Image: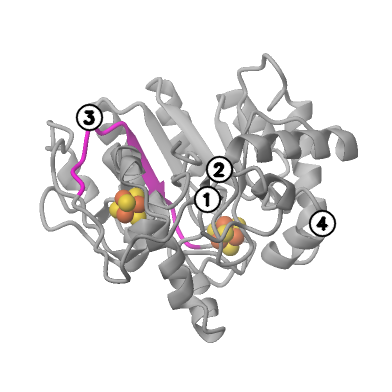
Amino acid sequence: MVVSPEFPQIIASDPLKTLTSTFPETLSFPPVRRGRLQTLQVNLGYRCNQTCSHCHVNAGPWRKEMMTREMIELIPEVLDRLNLHCLDLTGGAPELHPQFRDLVVSARSLGVDVIDRCNLTILSEPGHEDLAEFLAAMGVRVVASLPCYEQERVDLQRGQGVYERSIAGLKQLNRLGYGQPGSPLQLDLVFNPSGPSLPPAQEPLEAQYREALASSHGISFSHLLTITNMPIQRFARDLLHQGKLEPYQQILREAHRPENIQSVMCRSLISVSWTGALYDCDFNQQLNLASDSGPRTLVDLLSAADGLKDLPIAVADHCFGCTAGNGSSCGGSLT
Ligand code: SF4
Ligand code: SF4
């Protein structure tokens, strides 16, 4: 198994490195059925102030696709009708949507937990200087990408100057109470490898991040989430150009762990595109891989009182990215 070379001292102690390659190239991903639906993950649109090299949604400042106001106004109704506990907002940069704040206020007033998948640099974009205060006042959980605690790798993967602005954003969040010991304001960081390899074990990497960010910048955070790069969209195209796509897919297949299937995020989450179409997860959304059965749109969800339990999930080869090694989801590793 190939594990990310970024953190060699952790890789050396990774028990997974002893796994052997026992899976054939043609291994198909096993069938998966949905469990109890808990989270509505909504992609508010593809506009973003960044253009990261690994971005699986091809987001950027030039993208125009954004969810309509009418669709956004349906979301609290769906949360309420299906008794969902969590609204997970993604993009692009979800905060760039003009109705982002209205939606957060509505969801919080229903007692629903809200996650903002924040790229940190948005906190210092003109017109968004009060965003961090808003998130804190609403008790929104911030999940922020920081693929390394050192400048070079972050700027390489996410763009020149992103590291410095990310550190400034983290300090701003810390000042508001985010990520501080005992604070209810949760600030989670996301690590993903810079290339076609599996992330190292989450817990020791979290300790390494904690130490490095505290000593270099006085920054604290709640948890580190390690996420495997999905071989789709911009990342897949880059790998294809380098002749590394098939080898990476094989790495994921060979590291498949069947016990991770019960925890893959599609079992408890449903993903809504900016058009209102439903998918089993954000990756399937980017591949336009919709399930054959069950509700197809956000509107259909209003009458899906049973919460979609036991419906089959649309799986394909990329799903090995969720079950390889320690497993991967929007909430970090699965094991
Ligand atoms: S910040 Fe996120 S959405 Fe924006 S380009 Fe980077 S990975 Fe894509
Ligand atoms: S890629 Fe999506 S559908 Fe496939 S296992 Fe992961 S979460 Fe489920």
Identify the magenta region: 32-46
Assign a secondary structure to mark 3.
loop
Q: Residue 296's spot in the image, x, y percent? A: 17, 53
Left or right: 313 as drawn, with respect to 41: left
Pointer 4 or 2: first along the chain: 2
Q: Which amino acid type corresponds to the residue marked 4 in the rendered image?
A: Gln
Q: Nearer the viewer, residue 135 or 157?
A: 157
Residue type pointed to by label 2? Pro
Assign the C terminus to one quadrant of the image: top left
Tell me the crowding category of disc 3: few under 14, some 14 to 19, or many 20 or more residues within 10 angstroms, Cα based: many
Q: Main secondary structure of the magenta part?
A: loop
Label 3 vs label 4: CA separation?
43 Å
> Which mark is on residue 15?
2
Identify the residue shown where x is 54% and y is 56%: 198
Alpha carbon of mark 4 to alpha carbon of mark 2: how far? Answer: 29 Å
**Which of disc 1 and disc 4 is earlier in sequence?**
1
Label drawn at residue 18:
1
Query: Which residue corresponds to mark 3?
Result: 82
Amino acid at circle 1: Thr
- Counting from the top left corner in percent of width and height, residue 249 is at 42, 69
